[in-house]
Image (cartoon, helix red, strand yellow):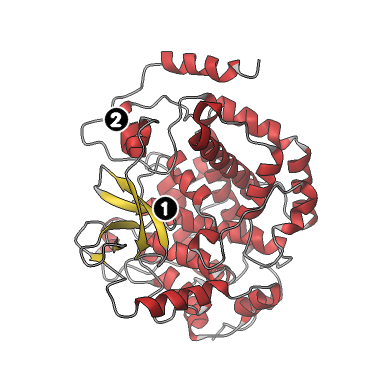
Amino acid sequence: GADSTPRLLQKSTMARPGGPQPRAGVRPTHPGVVFASFGCCQPREKMDDKVAKAMYGDMADQGVPRKKKEALCSWCYEQAVHFFIKETSTWLCDACKGRTAESPKAPDCMARLEGSGKGSAVCAKSKSDWEELVAKKKQAFSKPRNVTKIRYEMTRESPFRHLAQKEGLIRPFVYLASMSCQHRSLMAIQLGWSPIPEEGFGDAHEESWNILSKKSLGLRARCVGGLNKVNPFAPLLDWVGILNHVASTLYVPSYMSWSDEFQCEKLTVQEGKEESSAVHSRKVDTFEVELMDKVSKQQRSKMNRVQVCTVAQLMTSDNLRKLMALQQARGIERHSVSLFAIDSCFLQLARDKHLEKGQDADPVQGDEMVTAVATFLSNLVEGDVEMFEEAGLKDVKRPPLESILSSNFEPLWLTLGTLGMKPHSTMARVLPCIIMLMTQKEKLRLASIDISSQEFSKGGKG
């Protein structure tokens, strides 16, 4: 019967030895995914207890609740649940995933831990502008968005756009400018700073430029490896340089050559410079698609048989078929981003059901999947989830716009766990930003905005 599959799987998994035992002081893995003892929610290898403990804190013993508290967060300036992460003895804001610590100055607020240690705790509530910033954030998040406004942000001139153009970051800049303030804020927090107290907060162009270029924290700085970190003459990376760094760090180990792993040829620094100076470049587009495909396949390879079969079954349901048809009608092929979205949303739904009901969790349904995927691909524009109505949406419950939760980061946070990345390590900060930029391309297509069209590449030169 349907019930026996997980149990069979469980037996075979139990029988397999646990693989190499982690060394003492093994790095803590990701606190996002939930370790479950049954088929549809279990990682491929049965985890060693130590690793499981590190990964999920006390959630490894499913019965034991994790230490948590509700408090304001100095990263995202809202009331949220914070979970205690035993290995690092720090806390994690469940809304924005920022690292927090108890604040000696304000008992109802958690301080943000900037940098990697515990030395730099900033309590936002004890600063005099707290009320003002909370109001400013609500206002920036609640601005109504529509396609006209998005096009305007993507095409208007600004000193920041000129900088992005000059430094070969114009393509990601235009993607960022087309995002909601919520999504950009979340990216900044992932990279290591809170954008809300910054002067340019609320200006799409200034926020976008910061995300790309902020000294030692921006996306470009986070992709500088090795000795170049301390070399003042190291060239600043352009967009192709950033993509090359992510691709080689994650997918081309030192004993392999680029062409073993990637079909598209590796662009030289000079070619990269030329291709990075345009909003649209066919070569860069091909590279992005292939990189996203790698991420998607890597996540898929970490899923177990039951999960893979369940997703394959869901893909044949009327709901998902209709969703795909609606996406195709808007020019989205069935490829890595949508497949990545489907896997990520499935893993999140399976986890949430398991958290709620444990072994008695119901299977994930087609209409729940459609709703989750439509929400995942939402650009927070009026009606962009409802356009999938025909595919059978199920009670769409969305967090209020003024909350950072509306950026729906949870599926991506779980991806980091599925891929076994250590939270807040450099790659765990960079990869979600890269995926969000790739996903943005699809979100724009759904809104019938094509980044390769002429209107976005005019201006900026000079």
Left or right: residue 116 compared with residue 353: left
Which quarter of the figure is the N terminus placed in?
top right
Q: Residue at x 56, y 30 (%)?
A: 361
Query: Residue 188, can we see it?
Result: yes
Q: Position of residue 66 (x, y in %)?
A: 35, 41
Observer-side mark, 2 or 1, equals 1
Could you tell me which secondary element the residue under label 2 belongs to? helix
Q: Which mark is residue 94?
A: 1
Q: Position of residue 31 (x, y in %)?
A: 38, 43
Name the one closer to the observer, 99 or 155: 99
Give the image quarter of residue 46: top left
The kind of residue on which mark 1 rests is Asp
Q: Position of residue 280 (x, y in %)?
A: 63, 68
Amino acid, disc 2: Lys
Q: Nearer the viewer, residue 343 or 293?
A: 343
Q: Is residue 102 left or right of residue 2?
A: left
Question: Marks 2 and 1, how far apart in space?
Answer: 23 Å
Q: Quadrant of residue 49?
A: top left
309 is higher (above) or lower (below) than 400: above
Q: Is residue 110 left or right of residue 441?
A: left
**Residue 227 sits above or below residue 32 on the image:** below
Q: Secondary structure at mark 1?
A: loop
Q: Which residue is mark 2?
A: 50
Q: Earlier in the sequence, mark 2 or mark 1?
A: 2
Asked if residue 167 can be seen in this view, the reply is no
Using a 10 Å C-alpha cutoff, classify the residue at mark 2 as few (fewer than 14 neighbours), some (14 to 19) or many (20 or more).
some
Label 1 environment density (alpha carbons within 10 Å; few <14, some 14–19, many ≥20): some
In the picture, which quadrant includes the C terminus? bottom right
Query: Residue drawn 55% across and 20% down?
Result: 6
Q: Position of residue 265 (x, y in %)?
A: 55, 52
Task: Identify which residue, 161 or 13, lies in the foreground.
Answer: 13
